[in-house]
Image (cartoon, rainbow, N blue to C red):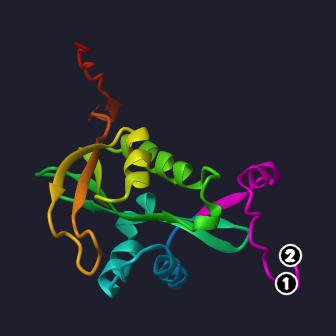
Amino acid sequence: LVGGAMEAPPEDVKERKRLGIHTYETDVTPNNVGQLRCLNTVIFPVRYNDGFYKDVVNENNRDITRMVYVSDMLVGSICCRFEGTKKEQRRVYIMTFGVLKAYRGYGIGSKLLKDLIETVDKMDGIDDIYLHVQVSNEYALAFYKKFGFEVIAKKENYYRNIDPPHCYVLSRKAKAKTNGEAKATPEKSKS
């Protein structure tokens, strides 16, 4: 700390990794959702309305929405919601997921996504986790594929005021459950 302000991390990735980045996670609450709003304006090219932030602080979504800090500075978040009812397909939708550019490469985003996948895989009745990714975002596509996400659809003109406006829908199946026990799923034959 210099003059009470937190220094930006060193630009050299190897040096940042050598120094280590210590993080902690927290829930998104009505008391800290303003910080999330600020983070989202820096990370994402779109602005989210009040309805988005109402979904984020909804008690039902608490287990699948997290913020991550380095010291006392918010550097990333994953914001999800449940979709569907018990009678129909139940899904977890990743509304937003991002880490400040200066803090990428430390495994912060990987940890957030791994934690989400583990949490969802322990839940009964969830079919999949899914999200939308802009077709030009090759980095994000490669990142999600490392975690077992697959492109299941392409939507034309999904985004407004962003070029290109098209996106892919990515999905990762949740582990199948019966009475709280994970079911073995048959492996696909490799031919």
Is there CB contact under 8 Å for labels 1 and 2? yes
Q: Is residue 165 magenta?
A: no
Q: Nearer the viewer, residue 9 or 95?
A: 9
- Residue under the image location 23 percent in, 70 percent down: 165
Q: Is residue 121 left or right of residue 173?
A: right
- For label 2, the residue is 1
> Is 155 placed left or right of 124 in the picture?
left
Image vertical order of residue 177 relative to residue 2, above or below: above
In the foreground, 163 or 176: 163
Q: What residue does disc 1 label?
A: 4
* Mark 1: secondary structure: loop
What x and y, as percent, mark residue 41? 47, 81
Tell whether 191 sits left or right of 107.
left
Q: CA distance from mark 1 to mark 2?
A: 6 Å
Residue found 61% across the figure and 72% down from its top: 74
Position in image of residue 16 (x %, y %): 76, 55
Amino acid type of the residue that numbered disc 2 sits on in the rendered structure: Leu
Q: Quadrant of the N terminus?
A: bottom right
Can residue 178 be spotted in the picture? no
Q: Check disc 2: other Cα within 10 Å, few if <14, some if 14-19, many if 20+.
A: few
